Image: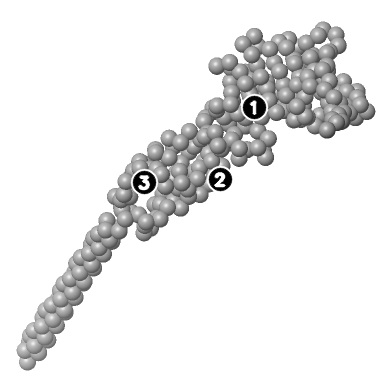
Amino acid sequence: MLNTRKNTITKHSLKLGRYYQFRYSLLDWILLIIAVIGVIWIFYCIKTWIYNSCRYPVSYIIVTGNRRYTTNTDINRIIIKLGALGTFITQDINIIQKEIEYLPWIQQVSIRKQWPDTLKLHIVEYVPLAYWNNSQTISVAGTIFSIPKEYQNQDNDTKIPYLYGPKGSEKAVLTNYHIFNAILKSNTFQIKSIQMDIRYSWELILQDNIHLKLGRNNIIERLYYFIKIYPVLLQEINNNNKYIDYIDLRYQSGFAIRWISNSITPVLYNK
Protein backbone atom coordinates (compact mmCIF):
# COMPACT_ATOMS: atom_id res chain seq x y z
CA MET A 1 0.00 0.00 0.00
CA LEU A 2 2.84 2.33 0.86
CA ASN A 3 4.75 1.47 -2.29
CA THR A 4 1.68 2.22 -4.41
CA ARG A 5 1.37 5.65 -2.83
CA LYS A 6 5.03 6.40 -3.38
CA ASN A 7 4.76 5.40 -7.00
CA THR A 8 1.75 7.70 -7.41
CA ILE A 9 3.68 10.64 -5.89
CA THR A 10 6.68 9.94 -8.11
CA LYS A 11 4.55 9.89 -11.27
CA HIS A 12 2.89 13.15 -10.20
CA SER A 13 6.30 14.77 -9.62
CA LEU A 14 7.47 13.68 -13.05
CA LYS A 15 4.39 15.23 -14.62
CA LEU A 16 5.01 18.53 -12.77
CA GLY A 17 8.67 18.50 -13.86
CA ARG A 18 7.73 17.98 -17.47
CA TYR A 19 5.12 20.74 -17.17
CA TYR A 20 7.57 23.26 -15.75
CA GLN A 21 10.25 22.22 -18.23
CA PHE A 22 7.80 22.81 -21.09
CA ARG A 23 6.67 26.11 -19.55
CA TYR A 24 10.23 27.48 -19.22
CA SER A 25 11.15 26.24 -22.68
CA LEU A 26 8.15 28.10 -24.14
CA LEU A 27 9.14 31.28 -22.25
CA ASP A 28 12.66 31.08 -23.67
CA TRP A 29 11.27 30.81 -27.17
CA ILE A 30 8.99 33.79 -26.61
CA LEU A 31 11.91 35.91 -25.34
CA LEU A 32 14.03 34.81 -28.28
CA ILE A 33 11.28 35.76 -30.74
CA ILE A 34 10.87 39.17 -29.06
CA ALA A 35 14.63 39.74 -29.24
CA VAL A 36 14.71 38.82 -32.93
CA ILE A 37 11.78 41.12 -33.64
CA GLY A 38 13.58 43.92 -31.73
CA VAL A 39 16.77 43.47 -33.76
CA ILE A 40 14.78 43.46 -36.99
CA TRP A 41 12.97 46.63 -35.92
CA ILE A 42 16.21 48.39 -35.03
CA PHE A 43 17.72 47.35 -38.35
CA TYR A 44 14.64 48.66 -40.13
CA CYS A 45 14.84 52.00 -38.30
CA ILE A 46 18.53 52.37 -39.16
CA LYS A 47 17.84 51.49 -42.78
CA THR A 48 15.00 54.04 -42.91
CA TRP A 49 17.20 56.72 -41.32
CA ILE A 50 19.96 56.09 -43.85
CA TYR A 51 17.47 56.11 -46.68
CA ASN A 52 15.98 59.41 -45.58
CA SER A 53 19.43 60.88 -45.10
CA CYS A 54 20.43 59.88 -48.59
CA ARG A 55 17.18 61.19 -49.97
CA TYR A 56 17.19 64.79 -48.68
CA PRO A 57 20.08 67.10 -49.69
CA VAL A 58 21.90 69.61 -47.50
CA SER A 59 19.70 72.69 -47.51
CA TYR A 60 21.25 75.14 -45.02
CA ILE A 61 24.72 76.52 -44.37
CA ILE A 62 25.50 78.42 -41.16
CA VAL A 63 28.70 80.51 -41.18
CA THR A 64 30.31 81.62 -37.90
CA GLY A 65 33.55 83.37 -37.02
CA ASN A 66 34.85 86.94 -36.93
CA ARG A 67 34.73 87.69 -40.64
CA ARG A 68 36.52 90.80 -41.85
CA TYR A 69 36.75 90.05 -45.56
CA THR A 70 34.75 86.87 -46.23
CA THR A 71 31.24 87.70 -47.40
CA ASN A 72 28.21 85.48 -47.90
CA THR A 73 28.67 86.14 -51.61
CA ASP A 74 32.11 84.53 -51.45
CA ILE A 75 30.67 81.43 -49.78
CA ASN A 76 27.77 81.21 -52.23
CA ARG A 77 30.12 81.55 -55.20
CA ILE A 78 32.22 78.64 -53.96
CA ILE A 79 29.17 76.45 -53.31
CA ILE A 80 27.77 77.19 -56.78
CA LYS A 81 31.15 76.40 -58.32
CA LEU A 82 31.10 72.96 -56.66
CA GLY A 83 27.66 72.17 -58.09
CA ALA A 84 24.68 70.70 -56.26
CA LEU A 85 25.30 69.77 -52.64
CA GLY A 86 24.99 66.14 -51.64
CA THR A 87 22.98 64.73 -48.78
CA PHE A 88 23.75 64.74 -45.08
CA ILE A 89 25.52 61.39 -45.42
CA THR A 90 27.08 61.66 -48.87
CA GLN A 91 28.33 65.27 -48.85
CA ASP A 92 32.14 65.42 -48.57
CA ILE A 93 32.84 68.42 -46.34
CA ASN A 94 36.59 68.24 -47.06
CA ILE A 95 35.97 69.47 -50.61
CA ILE A 96 34.12 72.56 -49.39
CA GLN A 97 36.77 73.18 -46.74
CA LYS A 98 39.64 73.12 -49.25
CA GLU A 99 37.83 75.42 -51.67
CA ILE A 100 37.19 78.03 -48.97
CA GLU A 101 40.78 77.81 -47.75
CA TYR A 102 41.92 78.82 -51.25
CA LEU A 103 40.77 82.35 -50.39
CA PRO A 104 44.12 84.00 -49.57
CA TRP A 105 42.92 85.75 -46.40
CA ILE A 106 41.60 82.55 -44.81
CA GLN A 107 43.73 81.06 -42.05
CA GLN A 108 41.55 78.08 -41.15
CA VAL A 109 38.12 76.60 -41.90
CA SER A 110 36.33 73.93 -39.88
CA ILE A 111 33.10 72.32 -41.09
CA ARG A 112 30.75 69.96 -39.33
CA LYS A 113 27.37 68.50 -40.15
CA GLN A 114 24.26 69.23 -38.11
CA TRP A 115 21.32 66.87 -38.46
CA PRO A 116 19.30 66.72 -40.57
CA ASP A 117 20.31 69.01 -43.47
CA THR A 118 22.73 71.70 -42.25
CA LEU A 119 26.43 72.42 -42.58
CA LYS A 120 28.12 74.66 -39.99
CA LEU A 121 31.20 76.55 -41.20
CA HIS A 122 33.56 78.29 -38.79
CA ILE A 123 35.99 80.65 -40.50
CA VAL A 124 39.21 82.06 -39.04
CA GLU A 125 40.78 84.85 -41.07
CA TYR A 126 44.26 86.31 -40.83
CA VAL A 127 44.22 89.42 -38.65
CA PRO A 128 45.84 92.27 -40.61
CA LEU A 129 48.68 94.19 -39.00
CA ALA A 130 49.93 96.26 -41.94
CA TYR A 131 49.82 96.56 -45.72
CA TRP A 132 52.90 95.43 -47.59
CA ASN A 133 54.04 97.33 -50.70
CA ASN A 134 50.44 98.33 -51.46
CA SER A 135 49.71 94.89 -52.87
CA GLN A 136 49.68 92.49 -49.93
CA THR A 137 48.93 92.38 -46.21
CA ILE A 138 50.95 91.19 -43.23
CA SER A 139 49.11 89.44 -40.40
CA VAL A 140 49.88 89.89 -36.70
CA ALA A 141 51.73 86.55 -36.90
CA GLY A 142 53.90 87.78 -39.77
CA THR A 143 52.14 85.86 -42.54
CA ILE A 144 51.85 87.67 -45.88
CA PHE A 145 48.52 87.29 -47.64
CA SER A 146 46.48 89.09 -50.27
CA ILE A 147 43.10 90.78 -50.10
CA PRO A 148 41.11 92.46 -52.88
CA LYS A 149 41.88 96.15 -53.34
CA GLU A 150 38.35 97.23 -52.48
CA TYR A 151 38.64 95.59 -49.05
CA GLN A 152 41.47 97.89 -48.01
CA ASN A 153 38.98 100.74 -47.71
CA GLN A 154 37.29 98.84 -44.88
CA ASP A 155 40.43 99.24 -42.76
CA ASN A 156 40.73 103.03 -42.89
CA ASP A 157 39.10 103.45 -39.50
CA THR A 158 41.52 101.03 -37.88
CA LYS A 159 44.55 103.02 -39.19
CA ILE A 160 46.48 100.05 -40.46
CA PRO A 161 50.00 101.23 -41.40
CA TYR A 162 51.76 100.71 -44.72
CA LEU A 163 55.12 98.97 -44.83
CA TYR A 164 57.48 99.10 -47.81
CA GLY A 165 60.68 97.27 -48.59
CA PRO A 166 62.58 95.28 -51.21
CA LYS A 167 61.54 91.72 -51.95
CA GLY A 168 62.52 89.38 -49.14
CA SER A 169 62.82 92.14 -46.52
CA GLU A 170 59.43 91.52 -44.93
CA LYS A 171 60.76 90.13 -41.65
CA ALA A 172 63.33 92.91 -41.22
CA VAL A 173 60.76 95.63 -41.87
CA LEU A 174 58.21 93.99 -39.60
CA THR A 175 60.75 93.59 -36.80
CA ASN A 176 61.72 97.26 -36.93
CA TYR A 177 58.06 98.25 -37.16
CA HIS A 178 57.43 96.64 -33.78
CA ILE A 179 60.47 98.41 -32.32
CA PHE A 180 59.57 101.80 -33.78
CA ASN A 181 55.93 101.45 -32.83
CA ALA A 182 56.74 100.59 -29.21
CA ILE A 183 58.95 103.67 -28.89
CA LEU A 184 56.59 106.09 -30.63
CA LYS A 185 53.36 104.76 -29.17
CA SER A 186 54.64 105.27 -25.63
CA ASN A 187 55.08 108.93 -26.60
CA THR A 188 51.62 109.28 -28.22
CA PHE A 189 52.86 109.06 -31.81
CA GLN A 190 51.35 106.73 -34.38
CA ILE A 191 53.02 105.31 -37.47
CA LYS A 192 51.34 105.73 -40.84
CA SER A 193 54.07 104.12 -42.94
CA ILE A 194 57.60 102.73 -42.83
CA GLN A 195 59.92 102.34 -45.79
CA MET A 196 63.27 100.62 -46.11
CA ASP A 197 65.07 101.02 -49.43
CA ILE A 198 67.64 98.73 -51.05
CA ARG A 199 70.44 100.54 -49.15
CA TYR A 200 68.73 99.72 -45.81
CA SER A 201 67.90 103.36 -45.24
CA TRP A 202 64.77 103.98 -43.16
CA GLU A 203 62.02 106.58 -43.47
CA LEU A 204 58.88 106.98 -41.36
CA ILE A 205 55.66 108.94 -41.78
CA LEU A 206 53.69 109.69 -38.62
CA GLN A 207 49.98 110.34 -38.18
CA ASP A 208 50.38 114.12 -38.71
CA ASN A 209 52.18 113.45 -42.00
CA ILE A 210 55.51 114.26 -40.37
CA HIS A 211 58.19 112.63 -42.46
CA LEU A 212 61.22 111.31 -40.54
CA LYS A 213 64.42 110.45 -42.39
CA LEU A 214 66.43 108.12 -40.14
CA GLY A 215 69.06 106.82 -42.54
CA ARG A 216 70.96 103.56 -42.09
CA ASN A 217 72.86 103.92 -38.84
CA ASN A 218 71.85 104.65 -35.25
CA ILE A 219 68.18 104.68 -36.23
CA ILE A 220 66.91 103.99 -32.70
CA GLU A 221 69.01 106.81 -31.21
CA ARG A 222 67.78 109.16 -33.93
CA LEU A 223 64.18 108.23 -33.19
CA TYR A 224 64.65 109.03 -29.50
CA TYR A 225 66.29 112.29 -30.51
CA PHE A 226 63.19 113.25 -32.50
CA ILE A 227 61.01 112.58 -29.45
CA LYS A 228 63.31 114.80 -27.40
CA ILE A 229 63.18 117.79 -29.78
CA TYR A 230 59.53 117.52 -30.78
CA PRO A 231 58.14 119.68 -27.90
CA VAL A 232 60.29 122.58 -29.18
CA LEU A 233 59.05 122.00 -32.73
CA LEU A 234 55.47 121.84 -31.48
CA GLN A 235 55.78 125.35 -30.03
CA GLU A 236 56.93 126.58 -33.41
CA ILE A 237 53.95 124.88 -35.04
CA ASN A 238 51.49 126.49 -32.65
CA ASN A 239 53.07 129.96 -32.58
CA ASN A 240 53.69 130.43 -36.31
CA ASN A 241 50.84 128.50 -37.90
CA LYS A 242 53.17 126.10 -39.69
CA TYR A 243 53.50 122.36 -39.92
CA ILE A 244 56.37 119.99 -40.63
CA ASP A 245 56.98 118.49 -44.02
CA TYR A 246 59.99 116.39 -43.05
CA ILE A 247 62.75 116.16 -40.48
CA ASP A 248 66.13 114.87 -41.60
CA LEU A 249 67.84 113.16 -38.64
CA ARG A 250 70.78 111.74 -40.57
CA TYR A 251 73.23 114.34 -39.26
CA GLN A 252 75.78 113.46 -36.60
CA SER A 253 74.85 116.55 -34.65
CA GLY A 254 71.57 118.34 -35.09
CA PHE A 255 68.93 117.89 -37.74
CA ALA A 256 67.40 119.58 -40.77
CA ILE A 257 63.75 120.48 -40.96
CA ARG A 258 61.51 121.65 -43.76
CA TRP A 259 58.53 123.76 -42.76
CA ILE A 260 55.36 124.29 -44.73
CA SER A 261 53.27 127.34 -43.94
CA ASN A 262 49.58 126.82 -43.27
CA SER A 263 48.69 130.49 -43.76
CA ILE A 264 46.57 131.69 -46.68
CA THR A 265 47.16 135.09 -48.27
CA PRO A 266 44.07 136.51 -50.03
CA VAL A 267 44.50 137.87 -53.52
CA LEU A 268 42.04 140.41 -55.00
CA TYR A 269 41.29 140.48 -58.69
CA ASN A 270 39.70 143.46 -60.42
CA LYS A 271 36.87 142.57 -62.73
Above or below residue 4? Residue 110 is above
Q: CA distance from mark 2 to mark 3?
A: 23 Å
Quadrant in which residue 193 is drawn:
top right
Report whether 198 appears left or right of 207: left
Quarter holding the C terminus is top right
Q: Give the color scheme: rainbow, by chain, secondary structure or one colour.
A: one colour
Above or below residue 164? Residue 151 is below
Residue 31 is situated, as x and y percent measured from the top left of the image, at 21, 72
Q: Which amino acid is tagged 2? A: Asn
Look at discs 2 and 3 and give the one toward the viewer.
3
Q: Determine the residue positioned at 50% across, 42% down.
A: 70
Residue 188 is situated, as x and y percent measured from the top left of the image, at 80, 32
Above or below residue 201? Residue 164 is below
Which numbered disc covers residue 8? none
- Density class for disc 3 (Cα within 10 Å; few <14, some 14-19, many ≥20) is few
Report whether 197 appears left or right of 145: right
In the rendered image, the residue lying farthest to the top is 252
Above or below residue 78? Residue 61 is below
Residue 26 vs residue 147, the one in the foreground: 147
Quadrant in which residue 247 is drawn:
top right
Residue 117 is situated, as x and y percent measured from the top left of the image, at 36, 57
Q: Which amino acid is tagged 3? A: Ile
Which numbered disc covers residue 162? 1
Q: Determine the residue positioned at 41% across, 44% down.
A: 77
- Could you say whether the residue bearing mark 1 is in a helix, strand or loop? strand
Report whether 150 appears left or right of 236: left
Q: Which badge, 2 or 1, comes first in the chain's sequence?
A: 2
Q: Which residue is mark 2?
A: 66
Q: Which residue is mark 3?
A: 80
- Density class for disc 2 (Cα within 10 Å; few <14, some 14-19, many ≥20) is few
Q: CA distance from mark 2 to mark 1?
A: 23 Å
Q: Which badge, 2 or 3, comes first in the chain's sequence?
A: 2
